[in-house]
Amino acid sequence: MQPRKRQTIGEWIFKASLVLSGGLIVAVLGLMCLTLLTHAWPSIVALKWKFVTTNTWDPITSTFGAEAFVIGTLLTSLLALFISLPFSLSVSIFLGEYAQRGILSEVFKAMINMLAGIPSVIYGFWGLFVLVPWIRTFQIWVGIPPFGIGIFTAALILALMIIPYAAAIGRDVIAMVPNELKEGAYSLGATRMEVLLTIVLPTARSGLFAGTLLSFGRAIGETMAVTMVIGNSNLLPTSIFAPGNTMASVIANEFSEATNAIHVSSLIELALYLFVITAIINIIGKWIIQRTEVSHG
Amino acid sequence: MRTGHETWRQCKNNAFHGLIILFSAILFLPLAAIIFHILKNGLHVLSWEFLTALPKPMGESGGGVGNAIAGTLLLIVLSSLIAIPIGIFTGVYLSENTHGKFSHIIHVAVDMLQGTPSIVIGIAAYIWIVKPMGHFSAFSGGVALALMMLPVIIKSTEETLKRIPNTLKEAALALGAPYYRTMLQIIIPTGFQGILTGVLLGIARVSGESAPLLFTAFGNPFLNLNMNKTVQALPLLIFNYATSPYEDWQAYAWGSSCLLLIFILSLTLLTKAIRPQ
Amino acid sequence: MNPDILTIEHLNFWIADQHIVKDLSLSFPENTITAIMGPSGCGKTTMLRCINRMHELIENTRVEGKIKLSGENIFKLNAMALRRRIGMVFQRPNPFPTMSIYNNVLAGYILNGISLSRKEKDQIVQEALTQAALWDEVKEGLHRKGTFLSGGQQQRLCIARALAMKPKILLLDEPTSALDPKATAHIESLLMELKDTVTVIMVTHNIAQASRISNQTAFMYLGELIEHGTTERMFTVPKDKRTEEYLSGKFG
Ligand SMILES: Nc1ncnc2c1ncn2[C@@H]1O[C@H](COP(=O)(O)OP(=O)(O)OP(=O)(O)O)[C@@H](O)[C@H]1O
Ligand SMILES: [Mg+2]
């Protein structure tokens, strides 16, 4: 009788731990949302829409208009997405369609894995010491102010960082396109390029879109590398080569030094927006991918 | 005419193939450049002293990043202690309850957590732990990193366990085994390799993170292994020293980058080696 | 024949709204081999799983009727205790991949947290492996992983694993359908020897196999038990036309 009782207790504890662990994850997420909201609340109430529609950010005079950072974030992320697209798409096509196996495919996979493994801070460090001088040379050569640092530099680094992520998703959705579809086209005498452009890519299009969306979400929240090369200027950027700031980089720069309550609160408000936007992007992106997985079996 | 058309189509096809390979291959340039510069500037900094000594004040030469190495290891241990059990248990729950509503909610939460920017996780850990305790600490850094590790461990556990044939579980239950022993003694050990892969990937992911540590572990110029005090970490040190104007400190940053890169790449290689087919 | 050790009385089983086993009554004499036959999807596996209450792992099921093991209604017993008294062998060999051959045999004890002395363990392992006709092949490498064995050896290991718990009844669900003819013959002769000590209930699609080794044959069709009796009678003078057709290979 004794061991059976022990087993019942063991059973109960085990099942409870499973549910509790899962519940903890959900609770952490809910709590994160709530905490950010309550701590951002003073700033939300005090500044209302002016927070995102004005562009003077001056902690000394307690003026907090984050428009420049919102624009900086969008500009760097969109630019990065734009730069990364041809490369991530090429890698996706190569790994998902041309060479699912073989030496070259292993080599490209290793390359992508390495790019994905390099920490953000090392990208930033390399960007600051190697890429920035290169950009500066380029800027002198073209005849624009040689900042070196700035939105464009940040976007280049960001592009490099999101390519592995986008390529991994892209490869999966392209590889998922059913063979029967492709064979149908081949049997009509189509070349590989024609099959790709008329069958594979259109079939994988929603998955590719989701991959792009998810990498955009990555880019928005990326912090350290951007902080190190963007120039940290609180002014509205005047061109893509000008220094700027993103929402994430402002938080990284100012949060530990912020003493004034409204300053802290407005930085947390930025974090809240980052959280909400990336959450929405992730839910939509993952949902689209899951749907394609289901429909392709 | 007809064959001309065919040749033209074939040409386009080959050109397209070439273009795809070209664009993919271009990515080697930045990768090679990054690795080259890190090895060139970092490799010669590495020495026994560099690995064990504390940083010297600016102006003095020598010294090392022993505090950051120890701190990074402490943070990895702390975050693993939190994330591994919770992650594995959540993964087990998800693999066992594939259709429930609660599972669906957990899935969404895991996806959201995975997508949450690391700086936001740092802020949350700051509000939850640093603020109530009144000071920065290694513990708060460990919690922040654990939150980043969790999704990786959960997903790999879930995927691994879902692939284990159901009859294995049935065989254990048919022997009269209670459910918890079946899971703990048969199913989880059977998926050990896959779960370990997830844990190592999780560690690789967080060991290079600096954003969540800015307001939690905070950094510390001295050696500390007390989880209630601030602690240095390699990525934090790289950030602080890279942006400093002193060349000695920049050399620390190059050396640390080299070290961190070697550590992360070895971890990734290790996961490749043990990953089940 | 021997007295019955297990009796199924008016068993009905539903998964969701689907009526899968319909009013099935059947008894199993002690130390005999019963072959359960019938076309695919007729509910053989389901019926077999009710006997050690493995059906409870499926959600949304309902069961009616009684199953009596030595007079006790199994639905009144503790499920885990019941399963320790009834062994089960599956279609595909499924030794536990993380365990050695030795521990696979002892898995029932390990998983139930029953501690044994070294001597007891050695004895149980040797006995069970001998009963399963595997001892001579593996005695040199008891601490190797069970998954290194051949398919037929793995299946015998699974039989040894079930026998180690000293069950009165052994349930087998198409135990040889994944094996080659030689391994199948090996298992058949082993089952013939086993019936001195255990009651064997076996689902099989192999008509010849049923006629070779079973004492009793039961024929199911669309969830119903059409007919049962001694194997000899069933194969020579079946009462139902469907039984005759099935056993002579005309349908199913
Ligand atoms: N888990 C389940 N959920 C829903 N229906 C099930 C489940 N298991 C079995 N069934 C249904 O119960 C019926 C009987 O299945 P069962 O596996 O018992 O047949 P069987 O006689 O063993 O067939 P086979 O010879 O192919 O093994 C089938 O119609 C099947 O679809
Ligand atoms: Mg069956």
Image: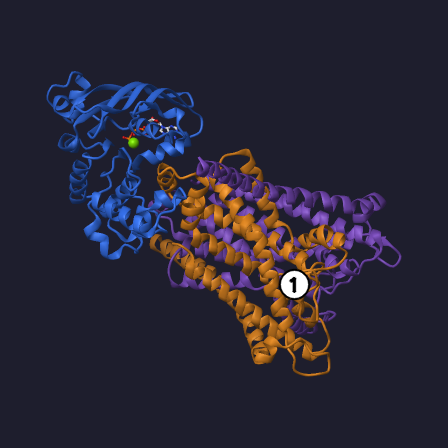
Chain colours: A purple, B orange, C blue
A126 sits left or right of B162 in the view: right
Residue marked by disc 1: A225
A206 sits left or right of A186 in the view: right
The one of B118 and C186 positioned closer to us in this rendering: C186
Q: What element carries label 1?
A: helix
Q: In which quarter of the image is residue C72?
A: top left
Q: How many labels does the image show?
A: 1
**Res. A2 visible in picture:** yes
Which residue is pictured at 76% across the width and 53% down the height?
Answer: B131
Quarter of the image that includes the C terminus of chain B: bottom left
Which residue is pictured at 41% across the width and 20% down the height?
Answer: C17
Percent x, y for residue A296?
44, 40
The image shows residue C174, relative to residue B57, as above or below, that is above
The one of B103 and C104 positioned closer to us in this rendering: C104
Which residue is pictured at 31% across the width and 54% down the height?
Answer: C145
The one of A172 and B139 positioned closer to us in this rendering: B139
Give me the chain letter of mark 1: A
Mark 1 residue CB less than 8 A from any atom of ligand 1: no
Residue count near mark 1 (Cα–Cα under 10 Å), binned few <14, some 14–19, many ≥20: many
Amino acid marked by disc 1: Ala
**Res. B23 visible in picture:** no
A288 sits left or right of A96 in the view: right
For ligand 1, give the image quadrant: top left
Percent x, y for residue B182?
42, 42
Percent x, y for residue B242?
68, 72
Quarter of the image that includes the N terminus of chain B: bottom left
Q: Residue furthest right?
A: A61
Percent x, y for residue C242?
19, 19
Q: In which quarter of the image is residue B243?
A: bottom right
